[in-house]
Image: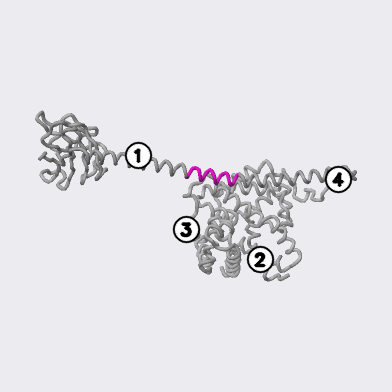
Amino acid sequence: MQEEQLIEGLRARDRKTTEYLYEKYSRALFAVIARIVSDKDIAEEVFHDAFIKITKKIDSYEESKGRLYTWMANICRNSAIDKLRSKEISQSGKTNGIDDFVYGLESQSGTMEQVEAIGVKELINNLNEDQRFIIDHIYFKGYTHSEVSEEFDIPLGTVKSRVRAALQVLKKNLHRI
Amino acid sequence: MDIQSYIASGKLELFLLGELTEREREEVLALAKTYPEIQKELDELEEAMFYFDNLTGPEPSPQVKEKIFANLEADFKKEEPLKAAPVTPKETQVVPLSPWKKFAVAASLVALLASAAAIYFAGKYYDTDQKFTALLLDQQVMADNLNQVKLQYEETDSRLDRLVSGDFKRVEMKGTGFEMQKDAKVDVFWDQKAQEVFVAVNNLNSLDAESDYQLWAIGKDGPVGIGLVNPGEKFTLQQMQAVAEAGAFAITIEPKGGSKAPTLEKLVVLGEVA
């Protein structure tokens, strides 16, 4: 399904289109949340609310302001960060970053998931220390780039270029897995 | 404009992460429209992010899907084919504006901007206020801690004063002679004139929840229980009840709360007054 068709169907509140959206994107969108909120139940609760928000707010989504996935991922990421900062969730609900995450993937059962987890681990292993740090904090711990800059005393420009470098490495290596 | 260095600046990545201000977003969108290289880079990055996200996650459980679709049920169009949904926007009627209406429009725009600014600053204020409240709480906790420490210090200080100014005799009680705890050692400090007694635990095993250590002053009328000894508080002075006359001090293990008369089989330490 083309993106325009998808958006049109969502705006028409079409059930099949919504199901298609769920099949195609639920895994990725849930990953965005689960990276930041490690407690599975809480992550699913955040995902539930975020997905409903996406279907309700689709009318205010503007195609000219960016692609659909980016818009949806931002809604999910922001919901997860909001949850993390709310008082409901204790420190223990927060992930400890990349290492926990990779470890968590490895300990999961199911062959398919294991194979994929190995790929992700390799992917992350391609990053150098600085890039890993950035991905860890921005992707897995829900920091914004300005928070990373402030908290770790790294100039904003450096943070930006490291985000860029890290994503370039991920982009380059994606086709190999 | 140097497109490559713009792409290299990292702005596109932040755009996708949703971390740019509205003005910066507009800038990226405008440039992407003008320069196909920028649009291409954006598309590729978005795709990379999607693949990465898609690979990294476990799937949400099927119950979540059920719950979502149950919640959305009321929103779905009833069995209406997708094509039937009209997508052509309705013609909007154009009404010419008279001049005062232009002013009204301008005025409402100004009002809108002012409200937006108000909301923005209210948000800032709220943030700062929260930080401030957190700091106040921290300070309160610190003040409480300080008070506690001060209280402890004063208590210790007054005990030390009494110990130094009084006429205290030190009576060492040892466990060597008994079967219970050979290496037990507790000191009694006794001021006979002021009738004050302190104990300082040097070595005493901890007890189960049903038992207590009880200190006895043994005088002419036999042993008198003068208080319970806490084995956990080592090397601090624990004040006991007043004693005017004693030839020896001893500690036994008694049922929780202490007994009227000592259980002699459970005698732990004994020390004679020199």
Residue of label 3:
A100
- For the residues labelled 3 and 4, say whether their Cβ atoms are less than 8 Å apart: no
Relative side of A143 to B178, left or right: right
Q: At which x and y percent is residue B176?
A: 12, 46
Magenta segment, which residues? B126-138
Residue of label 1:
B151
Report the disc number at residue A21: none
Near-viewer residue (B192 or A9): B192
Neighbour tally class for label 3: few under 14, some 14-19, many 20 plus, Cα within 10 Å: some
- Tell whether position B134 is magenta: yes
- Tell whether position B170 is magenta: no
- Of circles 1 and 3, which is in front? 1
First along the sequence among labels 2 and 4: 2
Residue of label 2:
B44
The amino acid marked with disc number 1 is: Leu
Q: Is the magenta stretch mostly helix, strand or loop?
A: helix
Q: Which chain carries label 2?
A: B
